[in-house]
Image (tube, grey):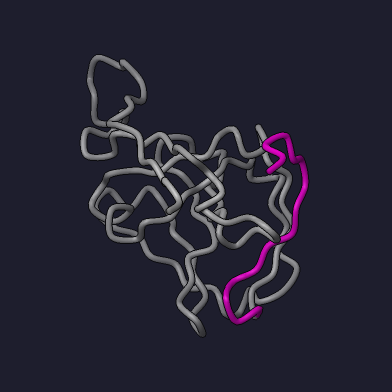
Amino acid sequence: MNKDIGEINGACHCGGVRFHVTLSDGLHSARRCNCSYCRMRGAVAVSAELAGFRLLQGEDLLTTYRFNTQSAAHFFCSRCGIYTHHQRRSNSRQYGVNVACLEGISPFDFAEVPVSDGIAHPSDDPSGAGPRQAGVLRFIPS
């Protein structure tokens, strides 16, 4: 797997939503989050600046989910239900993009994925300490 990938196409499961994305730091930014929503969603996300994400088709199929502070916008296909990307609460100038939607990439390609502490979100920390890592998720193929 080439972690230095710059641009790549992506799609939801049914192919109704298609996009092209320029990744901020390739696949090096891959991470998960342990907040209540991400814990249930279970996706690995990589970073892209808002201007680096271009929707090619399926805008009419995208549905948005917001919760708690209403700051983050999570987008998913209304036809197949797959989460494609979200506008981050921690950095509203970035999207988190679901690696499972990227052509030829699987979350199981990553031996380890850092897990951000979304339960104690950095935006809620009055000390301004910034993001914290809650742990690491490992995939060990049998």
Q: Position of residue 83 (x, y in %)?
A: 48, 65
- Which x, y percent locates residue 33? 34, 43
Task: List x then y, in percent, for residue 71.
Answer: 37, 48
* In the image, residue 13 lies in the stretch drawn in magenta: yes
Of residue 112 and residue 61, the one placed in the foreground of this image is 112
Question: Is 12 contained in the magenta span?
Answer: yes
Q: What residue is drawn where x is 57% and y is 56%? A: 106
Please tell me which residue is depicted at 50% across the width and 82% down the height of the picture: 80
The main secondary structure of the magenta stretch is: loop
Q: Is residue 117 left or right of residue 17?
A: left
The range drawn in magenta is 1-15
Q: Give the vertical position of 125 relative to 141 (above or below).
A: above
Hey, which quadrant is residue 74 in on the image? bottom left
Q: Which residue is pictured at 38% across the width and 65% down the height?
A: 65
Question: If the image is split into quadrants, where does the N terminus sit?
Answer: top right
Task: Please provide percent x and percent y for residue 24.
Answer: 66, 35
